[in-house]
Image (cartoon, rainbow, N blue to C red):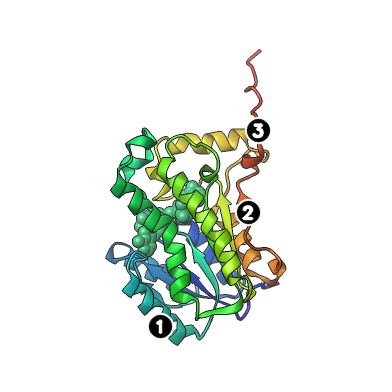
Amino acid sequence: MKLLEGKHALITGVANRWSIATGIARQMHAHGAKLAFIYQGERVKDEVQKLAAELGGGPAIECDVSNDEALLALSQRIAKDFGGLDILVHSIAFVNKEDLQGKVYETSREGFKLALDISSYSLIALVKALRETLNDGGSVMALTYYGATAIVPNYNIAGIAKAALEAIVRYLAFDLGERGIRVNAISAGPIKTASSRQVGGFSKMLDKVSAGSPLRRNISSDEVGKTAVYLASDLATAITADVHFVDAGYHAMGMFPDPPSDS
Ligand code: 0WD
């Protein structure tokens, strides 16, 4: 059964085929949604255009989310190509590499501003620009991580930006709720991507989840994609202002069993 037939989605945050947004796009395409993509600049243009062609041939539009003029142009282009938008996927984050290790108190004011602008405020900026284009009853979702509410060493400013993002999700859910538009966050477990590799000690995070989560494994971007389909579909019409974990249950562990002894 196709759950998103007739729906139009804007996918942000595709950099390459390993991006979480690519897993979301694959699943939304499989469920019949028509997709548009944004890309940040020339560095990722070819890759995003190629993926857009593979996933239904929708437009790939250049848009840096820190640029308000680009966001205005994006909303005009989406209105022209799609008429209205049913689904908005925010899958964007950026933190300077030096701020993804060491002490949080060493973070510079500029590094903090940049991280919060790109990783958190950009959801407000996208909704602001696209609010007229978003159809009543639509679904907005953003990617977050457990480090928003729990201490994950090295995630540092990224976790602080995710805490802001999750609060933004709740406030936007209230703002848009009177139009039946739902706003949720998906809290994904660690997945190897260009961004996550910047986090100090990232491969150890994968090991800890595969050893310590209830499902004893890591997760894939397509599993995040399937959850995104559900949240965007009419199966989830009463779900909003929520943070939904797709992390093999890792977030629910309060203590970890001892590793098996050799004897
Ligand atoms: O373990 C992980 N990978 C997790 C990621 C676990 C839980 C959550 N997340 C979140 C990330 O924090 C982010 O919000 O998922 C989202 C997607 O991250 P990703 O798929 O891991 O990373 P990546 O493939 O790098 O995509 C993020 C993209 C950027 O990629 P690059 O590699 O080019 O920095 O976000 C885009 C960009 O394409 N992006 C922007 N797009 C428009 N304007 C901007 C910008 N200013 N900055 C970054």
Residue plotted at (36% across, 35% down) = 105
Q: Quadrant of ligand 1?
A: bottom left
Q: Nearer the viewer, residue 244 or 19?
A: 244
Q: Dot 1 surroundings within 10 Å: few (below 14), some, or many (20 or more)?
A: some
Q: Residue 244 bears which disc, if any?
A: 2
Identify the image quadrant of the C terminus. Answer: top right
Whether residue 35 is visible here, answered yes or no, is: yes
Marks 1 and 3 sit apart, C-alpha to C-alpha, by 48 Å
At which x and y percent is residue 1? 71, 72
Marks 3 and 2 sit apart, C-alpha to C-alpha, by 18 Å
Amino acid type indicated by mark 2 = His
Q: Residue 15 bears which disc, if any?
A: none
Amino acid type indicated by mark 1 = Gln
**Secondary element at tag 1:** helix
Q: Earlier in the sequence, mark 1 or mark 3?
A: 1
Amino acid type indicated by mark 3 = Gly
Residue plotted at (64% across, 64% down) = 231
**Residue placed under numbered mark 1 in the picture:** 76
At which x and y percent is residue 152? 49, 37
**Residue placed under numbered mark 3 in the picture:** 254
At which x and y percent is residue 52? 44, 72
Q: Is residue 213 above or below residue 19?
A: above
The part of the image, by quadrant, that contains residue 128 is: bottom left
**Secondary element at tag 3:** loop
